[in-house]
Image (spheres, rainbow, N blue to C red):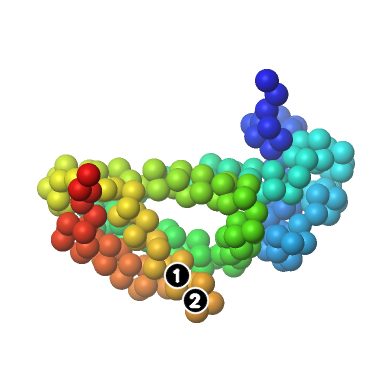
Amino acid sequence: MSAEPGTVRPGGRTARVRTAVLRAAGDVLVEQGFDRLDLAEVARRAEVGKTTVYRRWGTVTALVADLLADMAEQSLPRTRTGSVRDDLRANALLVQRTLADPRQGALFRAVIAAAACDPRTAEALRHFYAVRVAEWAPCVSEGVARGELPPGTDPATVVRAVSAPLYYGLFTTGTAPGPAAAERAADAALAAAEAGVYVTRD
């Protein structure tokens, strides 16, 4: 069975083409938004043939899905500090730096806006965040094992609770959060977790 467009993970020259095309796609998203993303323009910027881009990705949504997959692959691994408080703060600061970065922050805003009206982009975005949450969830599980958090605390919910205020602040104020906001978000999520708010009761 053939792979879906934009899902192959090649090596060699094809990998270099993928890198160039994804970089160009990100540039267009940052500069012009999802509505102006055009495969021919991406090919021109990446200095590759249009037929290569159309054959490999086929659609704009397939290209954005591959861009998100690449972003998940390139994301920094989680920090291990030995303390759930410090781990959650490290996670919050990583999210904060990403949202405050001129390119990455703009890219996320463009992709999130696209996901609101495009099902495949929405699916790709959910996968991206599922990968990132799974990367950081063990810091909560380890905190439970060390007795820092109540048994039954749901790790994924705690991790999402750390970053949620940062995204909400960005979208409601238009201003990227600073480090102090990141630390407050982590401390608030930790306080709720310590109080048993995120204990599952199935």
State if disc 2 and disc 1 touch (CB < 8 Å): yes
Q: Residue at x 30, y 55 (%)?
A: 158
In the rendering, which numbered label is found on residue 172?
2
Say which mark, if any, is on residue 37: none
Instruction: Name above or below for residue 176 compared with residue 90.
Output: below
Q: x, y (%) of residue 83?
A: 21, 52
- Which residue in the rendered view is the most extreme toward the top? 1
Image coordinates of residue 162 in percent, x first then y, are 34, 61
Query: Residue lying furthest bottom in this view?
Result: 173
Residue 135 is left or right of residue 158, and the answer is: right
Mark 1: which amino acid? Tyr
SS at badge 2: helix
Residue plotted at (50% across, 79% down): 173
Near-viewer residue (192 or 45): 192
Q: Where 52 sits versus 158, above or below?
A: above
Q: Residue at x 77, y 62 (%)?
A: 36
Give the crowd class for mark 1: few <14, some 14-19, many >=20 residues within 10 Å: few
The residue tagged 1 is 168
Q: Nearer the viewer, residue 191 or 154?
A: 154
Q: Is residue 74 visible?
A: no
Q: Position of residue 86 (x, y in %)?
A: 26, 57
Q: Residue at x 22, y 44 (%)?
A: 202
In the image, residue 42 lies at what x, y percent? 79, 51
